Image (tube, rainbow, N blue to C red):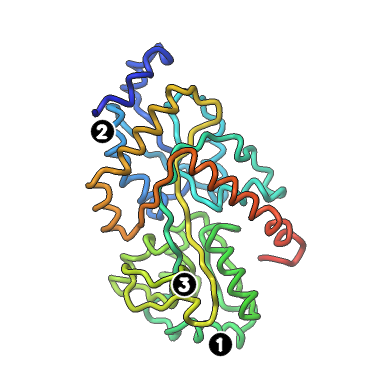
Amino acid sequence: MQRRGLLAWPALLPGIAHAQSAGLQLIVPYPPGGGNDIGARALAPLLERELGMPVVVLNRAGAASQIGMTQIARALPDGRTIGYGLWPQTTTLYLDPARQAQFTRASFTPLALHVTDPGAIVVRADSPWRSLADLVAASRARPDDVRMSDNGRFGHEHMASIALQRMAGLRFNQVHYQGAGPAIAALLGGQTEVAIFAIGTVRAQTEQGAMRALAILSDSESPHLPGIPTAAAQGFAITAGSARGFVAPAGLPPAIFQSLSAALERAIAAPEHAERMRQLAIPITYRNAEGFARYWEAEEQALTPLMAELLRPGAAD
């Protein structure tokens, strides 16, 4: 079973021996320490087992994942480079004309949707705010002053912040970072006062007492942050989260596509992976390549008019 994923490759890759020694590059377009990095590294050893070759995780952070996603899109479609992206961030990058992204949905081959991690609104543990109502009241008293951090402009965290500002009639001083790692450091260091992160990204900090969650951004409370009410239960019906999945460059040969997508399916379904993700508080929501492609297309259709609205001057920070 370990080498089933390689059976179709030698005919397509004359240098398969070199490919095996060089390994598969798994590009994470974010810094170490965030949810994307954690999810990719949790699966890499199992994917390595399924493919029978080394899997090397490479962090290529910058420009809210645009640098790394561009590198994935430009890679040779030979099965030796894949990426672990974040949605809706990937979609909003190319829907924003100002970013001049050198890729679109057509630049990639979807392989597998891995997880969907709900968001949470969090503050530092010593913050005076203990509920969403406290945050809203403080923000109304200090318009444009409360510093809200996110992992990148137009990511799910920023979109959720925009939704809260619209519903509550307030404005944050929105601060954008290049990934969860720097945004977490900013919150813990006092450079920002509140943030939105995926639950899996900050579960450890909340358990260790460094952060306190004010609200869960899903339809129900999370078993990983027990006792924290949803935003909807506190009067603001906001749901948001990060979907993370595996992609390859467009033009991947069918046999290599089948090998990679099947290896990912087996790795994600492995019992030890399910246990590891349970420990990390990241829910597996696997969709195969076809299901991932449909998800992405539907997301793009929904985001296109919203992005046009948000990109009007003064509409969003």
The nearer-to-camera label among 1 and 2 is: 2
Label 1, residues with CA under 10 Å away: few <14, some 14-19, many ≥20: few
Secondary element under disc 2, as helix, strand or loop, is helix
Query: Which amino acid type corresponds to the residue marked 3 in the rendered image?
Result: Ile
> Which residue corresponds to mark 1?
137
* Mark sitting earlier along the chain (3/1): 3
Q: How crowded is mark 3: few (under 14 residues within 10 Å), some or many (20 or more)?
A: many
Residue at 53% of width from left, 48% of height from top?
A: 295
Residue 63 % position (x, y): 57, 49
- Which image quarter is the N terminus in? top left
Mark 2 nearby-residue class (10 Å; few <14, some 14–19, many ≥20):
some
**Mark 3 → mark 1, Cα distance in angstroms:** 15 Å
**Disc ID at residue 225:** none
* As drawn, 14 above or below 183: above
- Residue that extends furthest to the right in the rendered view of this protein: 313
Where residue 173 appears, as percent x and y from the top left, is 61, 72
Confirm or deny contact between disc 3 and disc 1 (CB under 8 A).
no
Report which residue position mark 2 lands on: 49
Image quadrant in which the C terminus is located: bottom right
Q: What residue type is labelled 2?
A: Arg
C-beta proximity under 8 Å, tags 1 and 2: no
